[in-house]
Image (spheres, helix red, strand yellow):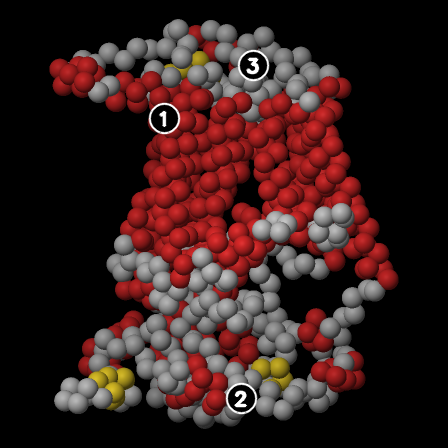
């Protein structure tokens, strides 16, 4: 009885799947999917090769400070960093006094006037998180061609490719006219209708090739580094990517360190437990 | 019930004698996982996974209770409480969160292994049908719990996953949409849905713990299966659970914890999806909505139904997806072969390995974008999945000629093939 019903149910599902398979294949043959510009011209991120990569990754604090400078002087005009507090900056090598000074440099922290109760602003203190560049998403849209600049706190973990993606995107703006992929196809000859619309910018590392963000890092020397590193576009992009890895994962170093001890401890314990197991079973053939 | 030669609990200390008279909990433990439970002597490492599943549940409950102390179940602040408070401000909050998120993956890895071990060695067959049925109930509860837990951080995949999964109910003819709205407490996932998911996500693990007690209880009546699938014939076939299997499980548990730690400390995001680090946005659909990896095979079955056939394709997909799990309830009666272990079933063994590959391919397809290649593969593999359980296995059970079984566990052990694992058998033939 059970087997009879099962046979019918199994045959029914298989038949419906065969029917679906037939129409999928039929549609595939009669109307083969045409390659899209995204498939042909989207590029996978290039490696940023940061010190924080891999299981032995650590932070290069000098680089994080340079990256912070790029964030502060370039990105922060449009992008928030709302999960990071000024006090967290001690993690990239600033001391308490420097953190206080950095926080005090911001005078746009929302507050309330203690006498009148009116909304006001005040100077930052280390406990504050980075202030938002726009009052709300509508203001952000209005100022940015209808695209909200994403918060950067988790940007390296919220995109496939992580820091490599951020680095590639920042250095990946190209002139669309005459742009060729690795196969040598010219994008506008192969796909004449994909011309980048006004207000967007061609960037093959972006999923749909056209990004609302104008190239933020345009020329060498846009930021003046205090440590003598040459502020090339490539260096600035790499440094800010490194900083954003830290912003999204400030516990990375600690995590790798604890992990080392946890795994070693457990492997040694497992070895001892294996000995105990062999000892208990020594007289029992199994 | 237990074997007549099972050791009897004999409290020696006066306090333990007093306790045994008033509330014999030590006796219960002794008989359940102590020296009072005789277990076949030839269990191989695949038998470690039941204890590991219990350990994984404990890890989830402990980390989950602490996480709940810091979590806000409100659509406005759930994302911030997880990614701001827990990940950055709570002491070791990042560790708890990674342990809980990856603990769910470890739980499923262990449980899938446990299920496939049961399939290979015929542990679902008489007299252990009830153990298997309760196991399928646990599996269903786990899937519900894991789904609701994934919604809680309220990232993009949380939100859109909730949207897609509750959308299954709208495939029910006539009343589907009403049921969906009733389940969600609104037209789209929002505070009402988030709060009830949180409440149920906290409740269900304790229900699972309860069903696990029944699962173990039901197991202790016939006793554990073993790699030969042959019944225990006498005392020489068994060893007491403690110290023999407590020692072996202790070793297994430490290896499990070491691998778990590698995941937590070095690859915490490996099994997750980047989109869940973006706050939920009802106005922006992610390019590819994919569930967590442990749902991929079932997601592939759902998506394989692309053409209407009397019923709408979506309804077929939902029926097949639920059916693919519900059919497991009938497995003990579908496979009528009296031989349990696939070590002695040449045809069923081949079908088993085809099923393993089939489910892995389904999983791969379920995690990939719905392009023609993956849809076609899903359709073929989903058809095999149903045919395997509902047609092929029952037919093999009738026609197959099993290889000779050992007369007893001890005979097999002394001949050197008492604990033969699936891979050893596959390589030997």
Q: CA distance from mark 1 to mark 3?
A: 23 Å
Circle 3 sits on which residue? B230
| Labels 2 and 3 touching (C-beta < 8 A) | no
B59 left or right, relative to B329: left
| Labels 1 and 3 touching (C-beta < 8 A) | no
User: Is B181 rendered above or below residue A218?
Assistant: above
Q: Residue at x 45, y 84 (%)?
A: A138
**Quarter of the image where the N terminus of chain A is located:** top right
In the rendered structure, the residue with mark 2 lies on which chain? Answer: A
Dot 1 crowding, Cα within 10 Å, few <14, some 14–19, many 20+: some
Secondary structure at badge 2 equals loop
Dot 3 crowding, Cα within 10 Å, few <14, some 14–19, many 20+: some
Q: Position of residue A134 (x, y in %)?
A: 39, 85
As rendered, which of B109 and A141 lies closer to the eye?
A141
Q: CA distance from mark 2 to mark 3?
A: 73 Å
As rendered, which of A204 and B77 lies closer to the eye?
B77
B88 left or right, relative to A44: left
Circle 1 sits on which residue? B246
Total marks drawn? 3
- Looking at this view, name the residue that lies furthest to the right: A30
- Looking at this view, name the residue that lies furthest to the front: B174
Q: CA distance from mark 1 to mark 2?
A: 65 Å
**Marking on residue A145:** 2
Mark 1 against mark 2, which lies toward the viewer?
2
Q: Position of residue B415 (x, y in %)?
A: 57, 13
Q: Position of residue B241 (x, y in %)?
A: 38, 20
B60 left or right, relative to A128: right
């Amino acid at each position: 009885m059970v087997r009879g019903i099962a046979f019918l149910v199994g045959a029914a599902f298989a038949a419906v799947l065969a029917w679906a398979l037939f129409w999928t294949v039929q549609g595939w043959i009669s109307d083969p999917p045409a390659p899209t510009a995204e498939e042909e011209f989207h590029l996978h991120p290039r490696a940023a090769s940061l010190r924080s990569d891999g299981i032995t990754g650590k932070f290069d604090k000098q680089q994080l400070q340079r990256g912070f400078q790029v964030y502060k002087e370039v990105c922060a005009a449009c992008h928030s960093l709302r999960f990071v507090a000024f006090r967290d900056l001690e993690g990239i090598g600033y001391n308490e006094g420097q953190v206080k000074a950095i926080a005090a440099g911001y005078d746009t922290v929302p507050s309330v006037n203690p006498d009148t109760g009116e909304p006001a602003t005040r100077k930052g203190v280390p406990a504050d998180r980075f202030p938002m560049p726009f009052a709300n998403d509508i203001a952000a849209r209005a100022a940015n061609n209808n695209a909200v600049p994403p918060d950067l706190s988790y940007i390296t973990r919220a995109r496939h490719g992580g820091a490599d993606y951020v680095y590639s995107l920042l250095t990946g703006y190209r002139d669309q006219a005459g742009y060729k992929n690795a196969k040598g196809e010219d994008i506008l000859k192969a796909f004449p209708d994909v011309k980048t619309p006004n207000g967007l910018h061609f960037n093959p590392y972006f999923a749909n090739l056209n990004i609302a963000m104008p190239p933020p890092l345009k020329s060498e020397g846009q930021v003046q580094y205090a440590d003598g590193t040459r502020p090339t576009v490539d260096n600035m992009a790499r440094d800010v990517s490194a900083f954003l890895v830290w912003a999204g994962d400030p516990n990375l170093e600690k995590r790798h360190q604890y992990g080392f001890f946890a795994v070693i401890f457990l492997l040694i314990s497992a070895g001892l437990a294996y000995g105990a197991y062999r000892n208990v079973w020594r007289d029992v053939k199994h | 019930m237990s074997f007549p030669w099972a050791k009897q609990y004999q409290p020696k200390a006066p306090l333990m004698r007093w306790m045994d008279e008033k509330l014999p909990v030590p006796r219960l433990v002794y008989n359940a996982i102590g020296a009072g439970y005789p277990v076949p002597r030839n269990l191989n490492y695949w038998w470690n996974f039941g204890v590991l599943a219990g350990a994984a549940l404990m890890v989830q409950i402990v980390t989950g209770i602490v996480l709940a102390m810091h979590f806000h179940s409100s659509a406005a602040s759930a994302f911030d409480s997880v990614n701001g408070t827990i990940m950055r401000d709570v002491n070791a909050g990042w560790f708890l969160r990674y342990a809980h998120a990856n603990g769910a993956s470890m739980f499923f890895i262990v449980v899938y292994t446990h299920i496939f071990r049961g399939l290979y060695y015929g542990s679902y067959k008489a007299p252990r049908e009830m153990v298997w049925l309760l196991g399928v109930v646990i599996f269903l509860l786990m899937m519900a719990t894991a789904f609701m837990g994934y919604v809680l951080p309220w990232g993009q995949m949380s939100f859109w996953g909730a949207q897609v999964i509750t959308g299954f109910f709208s495939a029910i003819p006539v009343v589907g949409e009403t049921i969906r709205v009733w389940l969600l407490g609104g037209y789209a996932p929002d505070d009402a849905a988030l709060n009830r998911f949180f409440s149920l996500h906290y409740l269900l693990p304790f229900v699972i713990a309860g069903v696990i007690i029944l699962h173990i209880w039901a197991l202790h009546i016939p006793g554990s299966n073993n790699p030969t699938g042959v019944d225990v014939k006498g005392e020489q076939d068994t060893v007491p659970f403690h110290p023999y299997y407590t020692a072996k499980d202790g070793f297994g548990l430490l290896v499990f914890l070491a691998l778990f730690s590698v995941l937590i400390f070095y690859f915490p995001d490996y099994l997750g999806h980047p989109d869940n680090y973006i706050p939920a946005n009802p106005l922006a659909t992610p390019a590819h909505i994919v569930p967590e990896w442990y749902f991929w095979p079932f997601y592939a079955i759902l998506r394989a139904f692309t053409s209407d056939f009397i019923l709408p394709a979506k309804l077929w997909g939902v029926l097949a997806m639920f059916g693919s799990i519900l059919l497991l309830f009938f497995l003990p009666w579908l496979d009528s072969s009296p031989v349990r272990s696939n070590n002695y079933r040449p045809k069923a063994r081949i079908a088993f390995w085809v099923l393993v590959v089939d489910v892995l391919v389904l999983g791969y397809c379920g995690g990939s974008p719905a392009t023609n290649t993956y849809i076609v593969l899903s359709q073929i593999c989903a058809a095999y999945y149903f045919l395997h359980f509902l047609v092929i296995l029952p037919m093999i059970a009738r026609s197959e000629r099993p290889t000779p079984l050992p007369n007893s566990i001890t005979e097999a052990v002394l001949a050197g093939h008492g604990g033969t694992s699936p891979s050893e058998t596959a390589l030997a033939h």
